[in-house]
Image (cartoon, rainbow, N blue to C red):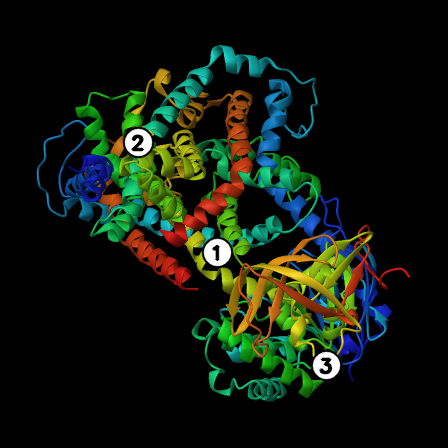
């Protein structure tokens, strides 16, 4: 008689089952419910389900803050990713080079990513404080800002947006650099040696060998970063809480403000549903990039 | 022959030497600039932790030096009169439970997908990873109802139930790569030597996937310290909060920021995590490549 | 315009290692020579080659190319080309782009670059493959692309690092002929690294045998084979290796194919040494007979192998004892202390 522990087919299902049950119960079902909520009038106070059709979406569409959040979400993600990719490539090149004190540098440049986002935002909250900002003080010293005047980084719409983007870039560059570094170290030494023998200098090697060969990894890093930026609410929540006057809200933070702070779960869900199409596009892109990576 | 090759040897050598020196200078300059940019807020945090209120709030004072003698009173206050240690304790508890649940669910699932005969194994692996992409900003809407039904409102146990929704998919994906990189022969040898398939998994495959398990443990644990959305949505009393939400909400009273306590707390959480990560960085780099290439 | 390559006291110690990977190597090629560096893996031959290429900085000593001291010069200023074991083709570039890459680095104008690349491709029979990518090529084709990329800018020196070891046995034989032909046509000084003695014997004008970072012997294939400088070279070369028999205060060596059954000898036994072999086992390999047994009468009784060519028909059975002869001039003598070759028995 074959013991159960030896029947591969049975065992395969048994070992997979707990994870599948958990994911179905706590992700798939809530996912469907959340979408269903967006067509209802469910609130924190009144959990009874009444179908209202597209009413929540219509309400959102009329709400200028929703439009601002939608626009901000795309703007922040795009600008953050462009800046992050440039800086992350430079950082990855640095971290694959040999130099003294590399351990310390590695530790320091990883800090922004390994620090919980909310706590990183706390650090910046002080850096960008309307009265105490050390950045203002530096600007006074170098004469770019009149003594005693303040930038009020988080108090003006444009500066506040730039600040949110800046902190997001600061936080994501280390992650992207580590991923890109994985790609760079995967290039065989022989290829780099061949480029040296073939007479390629640093720039030619960078543009014609390193970057083309790490392009799939760079794409993966960019997509991961984009997904994180796109769905993150903690930074906006802690740094500006959407302010000044809702100018810096993104979809995720606005959904939270409506759903939890305002208790209107249905409208919160209707806001968050707008995250899905872009995530789907990102997913397809990731799968393609990974497949291409496997081929080369 | 090119201009470079026809230049006198001595001149070429000097040129090569000059390039080497320049490249070294550039490397160190970039290293210093990158370190400063990354660490700037943390350095400031470290400085102001020990500042007196009169020093910190005096307009025009140099923020980078101690204009008045440094003091540890704010550090003392953080440890004795705030919920900081409670937050740390809650985080450790939640983190430990999440790690355990994640490993229990993800290890067998990843092994099953990597090794055992399943018709839809490949597609299932990708689907599990895609689950990671469903945004918490959408899920929390239904979770607020679920948490209430489970009677876990305002309880850290709610996080223990919810965090694996994020850690399990990623961990299955990571471990899948590690299991695939272990040669099948070794488990087959164990089975030929008289072990069952199950024993081959627990006694051979799991120990060999140890680097992957370390990566999963660190990932699941850091997520528990990083996560902000669920923690701030479902915890309201300070006795239940984790560091990520407790520090930003409890150390700010109304419009009054306890800057020194706030910054000291943020720094004390950030440093140990960064230390662990930089020690394990190479392992993560290889883990990521393996998972991505073979997943 | 063939040039010479010289190494003077060349040493490389990798950081964290006690033993140098390359230990005071002195070496000089002739103009247009095909020099083979031969040795077991880890003997330092590849490190030596990489120092000549400029990919590795020597700890001590000099590299001279065409008489010029090139220490401190980057690879691109050394007028060398190198073919790597893995071929190191750029996977994202087509064959044409791969071949043109060194010319592009020299900033050669596009039109001229094109002509040169086509010339090189023609020379190596790659004209049909110019638009393919490396992953679409067979092992032999990749090797030829690597060669085309190396020769396209007409370097003064070719450095080849085990370029045949990734090919299957059949392809390797043809590729060996192609490489040799190619060298005869262009006449460029070539340094070739291999651990395969068949490649070394077949291709080298001279062979440099290395062990533990040191050069043990330099010479034409025949000299190295017949007059090994020490017992390492004697046993590293040849298959089966040279038999070594200890005899009071010396080691006597002879190649397995230099021994003949005594009765085959028609003339007198002058100038020959006679000894007996207890035959334990006989192997038939491609028509030759390999006799494994115990030799007595040469020195201390020692296990040896004798290889009888297919043309020697003397019947010999396992388990019998047989008389053999070796010509005196085919015997090599080594000092048992230093293991270096000596002139022969004193007196």
The answer to whether dots 1 and 3 both sit on one chain is: no
Residue A63 placement, left or right of C34: left
Residue at the right extreme of this rendering: C347
Q: Nearer the viewer, residue A249 or B58?
A: A249
Mark 3 lies on residue: C188
Parent chain of label 1: A
Residue depicted at 58% across the width and 32% down the height: B42
Q: Is residue A171 visible?
A: no
Crowding near the residue tagged with mark 1, few <14, some 14–19, many ≥20 C-alpha atoms within 10 Å: few
SS state under label 2: helix
Mark 1 lies on residue: A82
> What number is the disc on residue B104?
2
Please say if B218 is above or below B172. Answer: above
Give the CA separation, mark 1 to mark 3. 49 Å
Identify the image quadrant of residue C232.
bottom right
The answer to whether dots 3 and 2 both sit on one chain is: no
Q: Nearer the viewer, residue B218 or B257?
A: B218
State the count of labels: 3
The C terminus of chain A sits in image quarter = bottom left
SS state under label 3: loop
Identify the image quadrant of residue C101.
bottom right
Residue B181 percent coordinates (x, y): 41, 48
Question: Viewer-nearest of labels 1 and 2?
Answer: 2
Question: Viewer-nearest of labels 1 and 3?
Answer: 3
């Amino acid at each position: 008689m074959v013991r159960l522990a030896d029947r591969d087919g049975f065992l395969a299902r048994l070992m997979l089952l707990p994870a599948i049950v958990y994911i179905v119960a706590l992700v798939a079902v809530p996912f469907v419910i959340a979408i269903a909520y967006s067509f209802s009038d469910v609130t924190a106070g009144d959990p009874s389900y009444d179908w209202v059709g597209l009413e929540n979406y219509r309400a959102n569409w009329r709400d200028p803050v929703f439009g601002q959040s939608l626009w901000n979400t795309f703007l922040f993600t795009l600008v953050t990713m462009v800046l992050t990719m440039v800086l992350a490539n430079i950082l990855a090149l640095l971290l694959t080079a040999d130099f003294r004190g590399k351990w310390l540098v590695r530790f320091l440049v990883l800090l922004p990513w390994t620090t919980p986002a909310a706590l990183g935002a706390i650090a910046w909250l002080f850096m960008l404080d309307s009265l105490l900002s050390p950045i203002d003080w530096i600007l006074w010293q170098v004469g770019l800002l009149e003594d005693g005047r303040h930038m009020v980084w988080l108090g003006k719409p444009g500066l506040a947006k730039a600040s949110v983007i800046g902190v997001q870039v600061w936080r994501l560059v280390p992650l992207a650099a580590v991923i890109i570094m994985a790609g760079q170290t995967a290039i065989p030494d022989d290829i780099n040696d061949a480029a040296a023998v073939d007479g390629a200098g640093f720039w030619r090697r960078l543009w014609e060998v390193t970057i083309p060969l790490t392009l799939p990894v760079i794409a993966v890093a960019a997509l991961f970063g984009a997904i994180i930026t796109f769905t993150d609410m903690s930074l906006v929540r802690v740094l500006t809480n959407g302010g000044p006057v809702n100018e810096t809200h993104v979809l995720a933070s606005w959904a939270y403000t409506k759903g939890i702070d305002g208790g209107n779960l249905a409208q919160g869900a209707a806001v968050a549903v707008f995250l899905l199409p872009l995530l789907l596009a990102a997913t397809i892109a990731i799968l393609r990039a990974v497949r291409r990576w496997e081929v080369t | 022959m090119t201009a470079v090759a026809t230049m006198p040897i001595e001149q070429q050598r000097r040129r090569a030497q000059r390039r080497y020196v320049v490249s070294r200078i550039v490397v160190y300059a970039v290293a210093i600039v990158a370190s400063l940019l990354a660490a700037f807020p943390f350095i400031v945090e470290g400085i102001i932790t020990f500042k007196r209120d009169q020093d910190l709030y005096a307009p025009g004072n140099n923020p980078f030096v101690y204009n008045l003698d440094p003091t540890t009173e704010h550090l003392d206050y953080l440890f004795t009169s705030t919920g900081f240690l409670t937050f740390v304790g809650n985080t450790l508890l939640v983190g430990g439970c999440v790690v355990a649940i994640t490993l229990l669910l993800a290890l067998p699932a990843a092994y099953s997908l990597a090794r055992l005969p399943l018709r839809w194994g490949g597609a299932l692996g990708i689907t599990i990873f895609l689950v990671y992409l469903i945004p918490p900003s959408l899920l929390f809407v239904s979770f607020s109802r679920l948490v209430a039904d489970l009677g876990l409102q305002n309880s850290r146990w709610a996080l223990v139930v919810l965090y694996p929704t994020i850690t399990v998919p990623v961990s299955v994906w990571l471990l899948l790569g590690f299991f695939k990189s272990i040669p099948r022969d070794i488990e087959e040898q164990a089975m030929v030597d008289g072990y069952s398939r199950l024993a081959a998994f627990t006694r051979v495959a799991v120990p060999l996937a140890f680097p992957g398990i370390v990566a999963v443990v660190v990932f699941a644990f850091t997520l528990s310290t990083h996560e902000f959305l669920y923690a701030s949505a479902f915890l309201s009393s300070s006795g239940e909060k984790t560091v990520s939400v407790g520090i930003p909400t409890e150390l700010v009273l109304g419009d009054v920021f306890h800057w020194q306590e706030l910054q000291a707390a943020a720094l004390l959480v950030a440093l140990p995590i960064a230390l662990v990560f930089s020690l394990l960085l190479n392992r993560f780099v290889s883990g990521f490549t393996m998972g991505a290439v073979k997943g | 315009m063939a040039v010479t390559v010289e190494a003077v006291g060349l040493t490389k110690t990798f950081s964290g290692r006690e033993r140098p990977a390359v230990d005071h190597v002195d070496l000089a090629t002739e103009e247009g020579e095909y020099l083979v560096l031969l040795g077991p893996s880890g003997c330092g031959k590849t490190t030596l080659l990489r120092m000549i290429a400029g990919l590795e900085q020597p700890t001590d000593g000099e590299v001279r190319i065409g008489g010029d001291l090139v220490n401190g010069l980057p690879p691109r200023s050394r007028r060398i080309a190198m073919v790597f074991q893995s071929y190191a083709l750029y996977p994202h570039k087509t064959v044409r782009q791969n071949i043109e890459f060194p010319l592009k680095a020299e900033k050669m104008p596009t039109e001229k670059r094109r002509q040169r690349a086509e010339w090189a491709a023609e020379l190596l029979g790659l004209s049909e493959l110019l638009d393919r990518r490396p992953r679409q090529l067979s092992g032999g084709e990749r090797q030829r692309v690597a060669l085309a990329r190396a020769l396209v800018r007409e370097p003064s020196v070719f450095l080849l690092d085990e370029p045949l070891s990734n090919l299957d046995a059949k392809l390797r034989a043809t590729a060996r002929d192609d490489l040799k032909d190619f060298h005869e046509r262009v006449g460029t000084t070539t340094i070739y690294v291999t651990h395969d003695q068949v490649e070394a014997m077949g291709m080298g004008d001279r062979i440099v045998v290395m062990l533990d970072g040191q050069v043990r012997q330099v010479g034409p294939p025949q000299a190295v084979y017949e007059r090994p400088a020490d017992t390492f070279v004697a046993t590293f070369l040849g298959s089966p290796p040279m038999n070594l028999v200890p005899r009071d205060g010396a080691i006597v060596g002879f190649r397995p194919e230099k021994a003949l059954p005594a009765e085959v000898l028609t003339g007198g036994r002058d100038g020959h040494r006679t000894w007996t072999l207890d035959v334990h086992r006989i192997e038939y390999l491609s028509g030759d007979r390999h006799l494994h047994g115990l030799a007595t009468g040469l020195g201390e009784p020692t296990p040896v192998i004798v290889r009888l060519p297919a043309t020697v028909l003397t019947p010999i059975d396992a388990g019998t004892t047989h008389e053999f002869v070796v010509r005196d001039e085919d015997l090599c003598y080594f000092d048992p202390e230093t293991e270096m070759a000596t002139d022969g028995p004193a007196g």
